[in-house]
Amino acid sequence: MEARCSRMNVKSTEGVLYIVHAPSEEWEGVTLRARRVLRTAALVVVRGSALLAANLIHSDVSMPLFDLDRETQTNSVQIIRNALLAGDVAWVRPDVSVWVPADGALLRMLLAQDVEVSPLPGASDLMTAIVLSGLPADRFSVLGAMPSLPEARRALLARVAHERHTLVCTVRGADVVGAMGDVTVILGDRRVAVYSNGRVWRGRAGKALSWTQDGILVVEGAVEGVSWSKEQVRDEVHSRLVKGESPRDVARMVARHAGWRRKAVYQMTLETSARLRGQAQEE
């Protein structure tokens, strides 16, 4: 108990790392508490956003700005730790609910060093997208970033095709049209929504859509009793075989999730396995 109390006393001499929600293009959405923290922080951490930096200056935030893009993760940890000795640090993020791998790794490194982290309440683009989609929000699965490569994207969709929950992911503007096409092929013509900077589009995956902004894609979960398409089953079989699963296990698992007869899936599995062996021999 004494060691624990001693550690807590040392901890109290450091500031708090506040995770501040501050969307670059919607500065009005920043809460009053967040603005107060930004004005009093010993250091304001950002990642490569000139517009965000301009908004901070316009809002009388004169504290030093630290751009994570200009340092390695190890140096970033040390810079933030040093600033915490002088007071609180504000890490400004466009959405506190969405983390790119680099930022997630940095946060884990800071937590591992017992840095006190406090996310400030504020809006979440992810939750906003789910609500505005009109799709069920009681249960949903967050998939992270939608892959840009078509093969990886289709493999991801095949893995979650049986999920009954609403599916949510971030998507690059250049990939939206391709992603919608893959959703149609792999998951079927489900209800979908795309959200970005206050704009939302709702419709069916198979409907033509012109969208160029990075945003959040929300997809309706699987409907009970609806079986997978042939293309969807084939992609899942291929994905599992490539991972080294046996044809029997592949047929059993895919048939259970897809609502197909195991015999039909097993036949497709054997054909796919033979094709993969032939490709390997050619190489």
Image (spheres, rainbow, N blue to C red):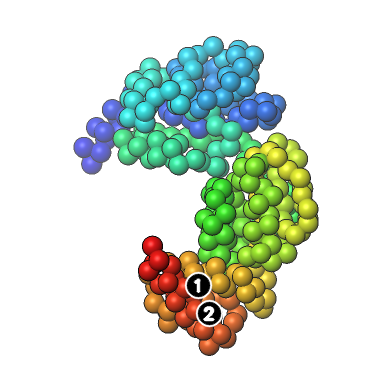
User: Could you tell me which residue is drawn at 38 percent across and 20 percent down?
Assistant: 83
Q: Is residue 154 above or below residue 109?
A: below
Circle 1/circle 2 CB separation < 8 Å = yes
The image shows residue 276, relative to residue 34, as above or below, that is below
- Quarter of the image where one finds residue 80: top left
- Expressed as whole percent of the image width and height from the top left, the position of residue 137 reads 66, 56
Please provide percent x and percent y for residue 84.
38, 23
Q: Is residue 119 visible?
A: yes
- In the rendered view, would you say 48 is above or below 168? above
Q: Is residue 245 left or right of residue 251?
A: left
Residue at image position (64%, 77%) is: 227
- Expressed as whole percent of the image width and height from the top left, the position of residue 194 reads 71, 48
Would you name the residue on which mark 2 appears? 268
Looking at the rendered structure, the secondary structure element under dot 1 is helix
- Judged from this view, the residue extending furthest toward the left is 3
- Which residue is located at x 66 percent, y 64 percent? 185
Pointer 1 residue: 237
Q: Amino acid at mark 2?
A: Met
Q: Nearer the viewer, residue 68 or 37?
A: 68
- On screen, residue 136 versus residue 41, left or right, reads right
Classify the position of the C terminus by image quarter. bottom left
Asked whether residue 41 is in view, the answer is no
